[in-house]
Image (cartoon, rainbow, N blue to C red):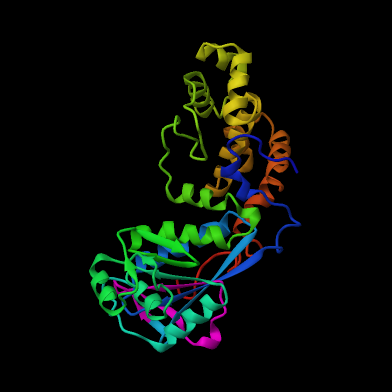
Amino acid sequence: MDTFQSALKLQNIGFQQTTESVGHERVVRVAFILLDHFSLTSLSTAMDALATGNLINSKTVYKVSTYSLLGGLVGSDIGIPLSSETLSVEKINHDALFVIGGQRVRLSSNPTIRRVLKKTAGGRGVVAGVWNAAFYLADAGLLDDQYCACHADSCALINEYYPQVKTGEAEYTFAQRRATCAGASSALDMTLAIMQVLSSQHDADLVDEIKRVHQPKKPPFNDVTLGAVSLVKPVPRPLNVAVSLMENHIEEPMEIDEIASHVGVSRRQLERRFARYLNAAPNRYYLELRLTRARQLIIQSNRSLTDVALATGFVSYPHFYKRFKDLFGLPPMTFRDNYYSSDFSNSERYAIAAGF
């Protein structure tokens, strides 16, 4: 299988697949402990990051379970209940354990939560406290002489009960496989930091891609190339204009000589700048840009594959078929079917807990 060469690689590497690679993923088990009146936004933010990791077909699959002290339905802060299993030490054998707090969660020491946190931490798992749930990590003795993040309304209580724990102003902390965050707005960054540790080496770029998905606003081109690659030096204006021309002429691609003429440089000068800043020749970058757009259309629309081919500048479907398969490892139709099928996107590939 061919690979992406240009700076677009990070946007697409998670989507590359072969029929042989399905079913050979590393499963990471993640447990969420839901406290009464837990923050539903915090939970969904963390779970959505895990689900996105699964959806882009990484080599790490996150399998999620939800628990509570009594089991059954647990009321969230906005009144929507979620189902859960009864929490017990015997059931917890996970790679990561999140305790989900919230503004209306009443904090009190609980021996079961204390034991499962100690068990997970002792087994080299990651333990995390969301919103004010740093309280429970502190109660388990897992934050002694460490900084933690918690909601401002709960810091005083933690300081009173656990003076050996340092509460700071950071939105989230992650050290020695202990993570805390102050609320829903920082749950994503904390979860991404945890995923960076839990993911396999193959997924080194996975977190950057998930962040791009969840923070979709496109930065200025001079700061970040297509939301994927940070650049050390400002992008020359001719390259900036050239890429903009390519983005605006996907359906009817321009000739490279024509693009060079529009930006006022020679073809050779343009090629040198593409090679230096985008790691590919202009033709190659243009092809990968069009196939990136094709991948987005295949996943996010019901358009026929022939329409997708025409919309991305391919004069014939066979040519599009070959190019797409070269880079993504599967024919377009198989790629679309597998992305949504139960074989490729089953309950273990999606990070969806019971009842969520």
Picture quadrant where residue 101 is located: bottom left
Within the image, what quadrant is residue 43 found in?
bottom left
* Residue 37 colored in magenta in the image: no
User: From this viewpoint, is residue 295 visible?
Assistant: no
- Percent across and percent down for residue 89 are 51, 87
For this rendering, which residue is in front, 237 or 107? Answer: 107
Residue 8 seen in the figure:
yes
Quadrant in which the C terminus is drawn: bottom left
Quadrant where the N terminus lies? top right
| Residue at (53% x, 60% y) in the render | 195
Residue 239 lies, in percent from the top left, at 52, 22
Q: Is residue 78 magenta?
A: yes
Range drawn in magenta = 74-100
Above or below residue 194? Residue 325 is: above
Name above or below for residue 31 compared with residue 248: below
Q: Residue at x 62, y 49 (%)?
A: 15
Number of numbered labels in the structure image: 0
Q: Residue at x 37, y 58 (%)?
A: 186
- Relative placement, left or right, of 59 versus 20 is left
Coordinates of residue 347 in the picture (x, y in percent): 58, 69
